[in-house]
Image (tube, helix red, strand yellow):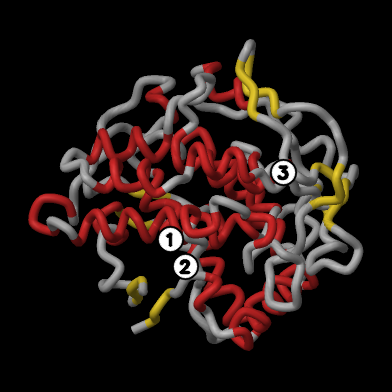
Amino acid sequence: MEVRREWGDTPEPERAAYVEAIKCLWEQPSQLDQDKYPGALNRFLDFSVVHIEMTLHIHISALFFTWHRNFIRIFQREMRDKCGYHGSMPYWDWAKWASSPQTSPLFDGGPYSLGSDGVYVDDGPVILGPNNTLPHGTGGGCLKEDSHFANFVSTMGPYNVNIIFQGTGVLPPGMYTNGSITQCLKRDINAAVAQKYTNQSLIDEMMAQSDLGVFQTLMNGAPGTKNIGLHAGGHFTIGKIGSDFFASPQDPAFWVHHANVDRLYTQWQAADPENRQYAISGTSTVLNLPPSENVTLDYTQTWMELDQDRKMEELMDVTKGEFCYRYE
């Protein structure tokens, strides 16, 4: 059984191999239609396309936890099959490093990190909506020249989060028209956001809930309000494209962030498996816009060409089917 460890507790050789596997995926050719998805320059960016295509279903819905659980598994499979990575999937314990994420083993820019913060650029606060901002972090610009992933680029987004409120369930036209325009990978590591929105007290409050609906709300927050939730708190700790509602997988930190989301969900399930292992709450559309039927264990999820379609029931237990791991 695979044992998933916190990034800082993962042996340095395994961390180095993990970073090299992501760089390897960057060099692998895309397997998507380049006319339709010009931003998919390589296999690594294929995952961002799929995330964008599915965003109006896999966020703030009953699909959130299990869709991303399998998304991580697929990414790890690609690292193994295409790039020879045989280590575990590490996770990022947000609260452990909340006081100074920019100097943590994840983002300190060292040889066993996930790269650096961005170069400091004073581009003002993060705008969430009218009269709703987050403070600027310690970066804002491109990753530092000697950092891992400094040669990575962003080819999709940023996107306006208000797309989710249109209520059509369909992405607007033009989502990929900037595919030929590349920007350097930017970060704005944000300790103020980490301390306020990913602290241990908030995690403990969420883990104490017996109702899945309440658990989901505390994880996901309420878009457009000051209640951004733990999940978005992690994304905004990374900042820039890593905080984009649609296109965040373009930052390699996405994967350890979502592994932590999965860790907390897995632990919550394990605390009362009789009532929680196969619990489902909600529908298959973001904020139930447009209204959709409640999801059941027979509901079929898709990851497009990345994987075969799978029923919810296949995704609920990390020790069954395609899954075989636990968190340390």
Q: Residue at x 33, y 38 (%)?
A: 216
Q: Which mark is residue 70?
A: 1
Amino acid tagged 1: Asn
Compared to residue 5, the image places residue 101 above or below, namely: above
**For the residues bearing labels 2 and 1, Cβ distance under 8 angstroms:** yes
**Circle 2 is placed at which residue position?**
73
Numbered label tally: 3
Give the quarter of the image for residue 153.
bottom right
- Image spot of residue 214 (x, y percent): 26, 34
Mark 1 burial class by Cα count in 10 Å: few <14, some 14-19, many 20+: many
Estimate the spatial distance between the alpha carbons at disc 2 and disc 1, rounded to whole Å: 5 Å
Give the amino acid type for the residue marked by disc 3 in the picture. Answer: Ile
Q: Is residue 276 above or below residue 320?
A: above
**Residue labelled with disc 3:** 241
Which label sits in the foreground, 3 or 2?
3
Query: Residue 130 has which mark?
Result: none
Q: Quadrant of the N terminus?
A: bottom left
* Closest to the observer, 38 or 122: 122
In primary-sequence order, the first of circles 3 and 2 is: 2
Q: What is the distance, in whole Å, between disc 3 and disc 2 at their CAs? A: 22 Å
Q: What's under tag 2, amino acid-wise?
A: Arg
